[in-house]
Image (tube, rainbow, N blue to C red):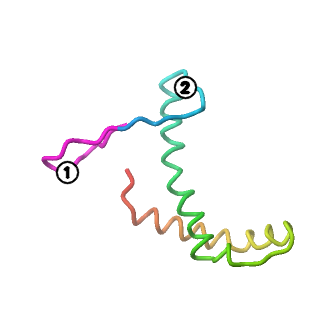
């Protein structure tokens, strides 16, 4: 992958993605790139659960209680992730 529009006078960044999933075609390679791009939304979603919804501070006794809480908090965490992603230039 490479930086498509580097700042003027700056050499563009180029990096290699390493994966444990087989890549046999160019289409496979671009699919792995797409997966990597989704990583940032997932990171922001988990950050929203941890920090915005204080998920780690809740003392739940059962898996069922955790699933119920996640059902309630997921829309809020997703909204946080989308707002964070819209405000960040990660292209």
Please say if 13 is above or below 42.
above
- Disc 2 to disc 1, how far (Cα)? 32 Å
**Which percent across, then down, holds residue 71?**
75, 69
What residue is drawn where x is 37% and y is 50%? 91
Please say if 36 is above or below 20.
below
The count of marks equals 2
Per the rendering, the mark at residue 70 is none
**Which percent across, then down, holds residue 29?**
49, 30
Local crowd size for mark 1, using a 10 Å CA cut-off: few (<14), some (14–19), many (≥20): few
Local crowd size for mark 2, using a 10 Å CA cut-off: few (<14), some (14–19), many (≥20): few
Q: What stretch is highlighted in magenta?
A: 1-14
Per the rendering, the mark at residue 23 is 2
Q: SS class of the residue under badge 1? A: loop
Q: In this view, does 9 lie to the left or right of 42?
A: left
What residue is drawn where x is 37% and y is 37%? 1
Q: Mark 1 points at which residue?
A: 7
Q: SS class of the residue under badge 2? A: loop
Q: In this view, does 5 lie to the left or right of 38?
A: left
Q: Residue 7: within the magenta?
A: yes
**Which percent across, then down, holds residue 74?**
67, 68
Q: Which of marks 2 and 1 is nearer the N terminus?
A: 1
What residue is drawn where x is 48% and y is 39%? 33
Please say if 70 is above or below 23.
below
Q: Residue furthest top?
A: 24
Q: Residue 12: within the magenta?
A: yes
Please say if 35 is above or below 68.
above
What residue is drawn where x is 62% and y is 70%? 49
């Amino acid at each position: 992958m490479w930086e498509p529009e580097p700042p003027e006078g700056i050499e563009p960044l180029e990096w290699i993605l390493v994966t444990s999933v087989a890549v046999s075609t160019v289409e496979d390679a671009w699919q792995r790139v797409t997966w990597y791009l989704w990583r940032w939304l997932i990171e922001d979603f988990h950050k929203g659960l941890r920090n915005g919804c204080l998920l780690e501070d809740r003392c739940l006794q059962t898996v069922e209680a955790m699933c119920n809480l996640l059902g309630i908090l997921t829309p809020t965490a997703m909204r946080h992730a989308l707002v964070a992603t819209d405000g960040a230039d990660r292209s």
